Amino acid sequence: MSTIFEQIIERKLPSEVLFEDEDIICIHDKFPQAPVHILLITKKVIPSIDKLTKEDAYLLTKIFVKAKELALEHKIEDGYRILTNHGSSAGQTVPHLHFHLLGGKVLSSKGG
Ligand code: AMP
């Protein structure tokens, strides 16, 4: 069974794509938790950060640099949060590595 994000990458599910290259795809979250809520998703199916290997580390650089650029594009460069969830107790619902870029409001809690 492919993940929701694989289906989005394969254009089997609709999404608002903000950026895409051979390694990552960036889309608006369908259920935004903040005025700006963007998902940065690896095209390689890695179930979560817990399964990341050194060979995959370049993906993190790519994602964090793109997150910074998207923050600027969406005018939230003064304050934003980047996070990833591993495991259901942390709130992970899609087992395919992705990072949330959140901003556009005061983000009061660090989670917990
Ligand atoms: P997580 O809960 O950390 O695994 O994040 C999964 C995210 O995917 C959640 O913030 C959902 O709102 C979001 N999401 C679920 N389905 C879709 C979809 N079809 N398009 C865009 N975002 C989605």
Image: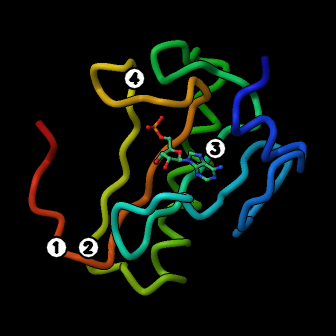
User: Helix, strand, or loop for circle 2?
Assistant: loop
* Picture residue at 34% right of the left edge, 68% below the top: 34
Among the two numbered marks 1 and 3 on one chain, the one whose residue lies closer to the N terminus? 3
Q: What residue does disc 4 label?
A: 86
Q: What residue does disc 2 label?
A: 79
Report the mark closest to the observer, 4 or 2.
Answer: 4
| Contact? badges 1 and 3 (CB < 8 Å) | no
Among the two numbered marks 1 and 2 on one chain, the one whose residue lies closer to the N terminus? 2
Q: Residues within 10 Å of mark 4 (few under 14, many from 20)?
A: some
Quadrant containing the C terminus is top left
- What's the distance in space between the residues labelled 1 and 2, CA to CA? 8 Å
Figure check: 76 above or below 103? below
* Picture residue at 78% right of the left edge, 24% below the top: 2
Front-most of 54 and 28?
Answer: 28
Q: What residue does disc 1 label?
A: 106
| Contact? badges 1 and 2 (CB < 8 Å) | yes
Among the two numbered marks 4 and 2 on one chain, the one whose residue lies closer to the N terminus? 2
x and y percentages locating residue 28 in the rendered image: 59, 64
| Contact? badges 4 and 3 (CB < 8 Å) | no
